[in-house]
Image: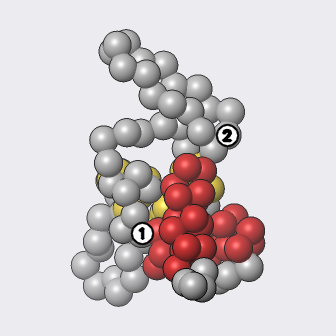
Amino acid sequence: MASLTMVANSNSLSGAREGTSVSSQSSCSIPLQRFYSPEQVAELWALSSHTIRRIFENEPDVLVIEKPHVYGKRRRHRTLRIPESVVQRVYHRLAKKGRPTC
């Protein structure tokens, strides 16, 4: 049976599905926000899901769920979940690049 590895690009984690509740016994609170799949962001931005994966795969705070590599398999299996705050941050960063400077 294959095991899954979850990797977060930062120390903060939150629920991966809308409506998911997370309870914590520690004193720090975990903010709940909406997470998007690459396909959902691709539809919003009118880009391919492949392009969205390339943009977000190394972005901080993106949740990456990865299956361990199986010998003989060429393709890696990774699932990305992108927090709404990261979608907004990247959008604003990319929008600034496209603005003309006068």
- Residue 83 coordinates in the image, percent (x, y): 54, 50
- Disc 2 marks a residue whose amino acid type is Glu
Please indicate whether residue 53 sits to the left or right of residue 7 in the image. Answer: right
Q: Quadrant of residue 37?
A: bottom right
The residue lying toward the viewer, choosing from 68 and 101, is 101
Image colouring: secondary structure
As drawn, the residue found furthest toward the front would be 102
As drawn, the residue found furthest toward the left would be 71
How far apart marks 1 and 2 lie (CA) works out to 21 Å
- Disc 1 marks a residue whose amino acid type is Glu
Q: Quadrant of the N terminus?
A: bottom left
Query: In this rendering, is residue 34 above or below 73?
Result: above
Q: Quadrant of residue 39?
A: bottom right
Which residue is disc 1 drawn over?
57
- The residue at 40%/64% (across/down) is 59
User: Is residue 101 at least partly visible in the picture?
Assistant: yes
Q: Are marks 1 and 2 in contact (CB under 8 Å)?
A: no
Q: Quadrant of the C terminus?
A: bottom right
- Numbered badge on residue 18: 2
Q: Secondary structure at mark 2?
A: loop
Please indicate whether residue 38 sits to the left or right of residue 10 in the image. Answer: right
User: Is residue 65 at least partly visible in the picture?
Assistant: no
Please indicate whether residue 35 sits to the left or right of residue 7 in the image. Answer: right
- The residue at 53%/58% (across/down) is 89
- The residue at 34%/13% (across/down) is 27
Query: In this rendering, is residue 23 above or below 86?
Result: above
Query: In this rendering, is residue 1 above or below 55?
Result: above
- Numbered badge on residue 70: none
